[in-house]
Amino acid sequence: MPPSVDAMPAPGDAASAGDVRMISSKELRAHASADDLWISISGDVYDVTPWLPHHPGGDLPLITLAGQDATDAFAAYHPPSARPLLRRFFVGRLSDYTVSPASADYRRLLAQLSSAGLFERVGPTPKVLLVLMAVLFYAALYLVLACASAWRTSSREGSSASSGSSPAGWATTRATTTSRATRSSTASCRINLLVQSALFVLTEKRVPQRLLEIAGVAAFWAWYPLLVASLPNWWERVAFVLFSFTICGIQHVQFCLNHFSSDVYVGPPKGNDWFEKQTAGTLDILCPPWMDWFHGGLQFQIEHHLFPRLPRCHLRKVAPAVRDLCKKHGLTYSAASFWGANVLTWKTLRAAALQARSATSGAAPKNLVWEALNTHG
């Protein structure tokens, strides 16, 4: 049983006492498996093997950075209050710890944002939006159930209970490639997402809060068919389902623009070039401030990847500093207009489909667009 946090000295205290174990980067790299997993943060080395099954973010982030420096990733995804939890896993200090100029500037910018309180201060916007979404949702229900018009609409679905998709499944999709069995052929891309979510919560070995995930998906399949059944005839039911799925698809177009319009895989993850990998693997969408409501903050995908804890209402404020940082270190800051990003996405999907076709022995479908959509999840 590991000692408690209070019983362990802080890494800095151990280093000042002169009795700390010195570890080389070569030795750190030797502990890079799920059964023997060391990482370094700010020059301190931690054996997080016993923490692997309990990590709230799952085991994949730790496994991908095993045996490496994880300072930037840790700072990006964890608040300062998480730092004391590391003490119980402390094993020593790196003897050859270095920081790249890009990482040093990134950490400096992160500290400035934290000092300014941007990670905690969100203002009234989220509450106002929640009230607005609730009003629109109930207005949509009223239009569907109480009005005589044949052209009825539903509100934009945004959670597992309203859309039938699993948040944990989406998180896992972003962390690793969806299995080929999950990407089976289905009637449409929207239905494909629903099937993937159901398969994920029912078949994956480790699903955080599985019961809540299943409850969310089950709630969708309970209320949505009931809503559709309340329509007066089959013509309106079919039209309603197709129209509501199409409207929801606009949201998924936004996801595709940020993640599929550029090279999302830029090599195996390495802790010492984390900042560079985050800026290289995504794309921002150029838009005026009055269009922020449409993109919902997703247009600042580079900033979101660099500062995932930062509320989206602050991403536009941070973007100029990130652009300057990329320019200073000769890094590409990729940005395109909405239509330009659509063109890039289609090119990426076509290239992926051709690669999928060439990788199979004639078994790939003739429809390149469909194969590409399944390839990218």
Image: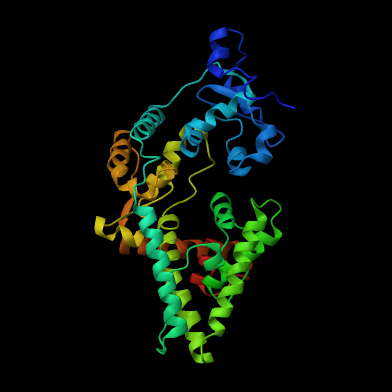
Residue 314 appears in the picture as rendered: yes
- Residue 165 position, x and y percent, is 56, 64
Residue occupying image coordinates x 63% and y 70%: 363
Residue occupying image coordinates x 57% and y 74%: 223
- Residue 173 position, x and y percent, is 56, 55
Query: How many numbered discs?
Result: 0
Q: Nearer the viewer, residue 155 or 197?
A: 155
Q: Nearer the viewer, residue 349 or 67?
A: 67
Q: As drawn, which residue projects farthest toward the right?
A: 1
Q: As drawn, which residue projects farthest toward the top?
A: 18
- Residue 143 position, x and y percent, is 41, 81
- Residue 220 position, x and y percent, is 58, 69
Residue occupying image coordinates x 48% and y 74%: 245
In this rendering, is residue 16 above or below 101? above
In this rendering, is residue 335 above or below 310? below
Quadrant of the rendered image containing residue 151: bottom left
Q: Nearer the viewer, residue 232 or 288?
A: 232
Q: Is residue 285 left or right of residue 280?
A: left
Residue occupying image coordinates x 43% and y 70%: 137
Q: Quadrant of the N terminus?
A: top right
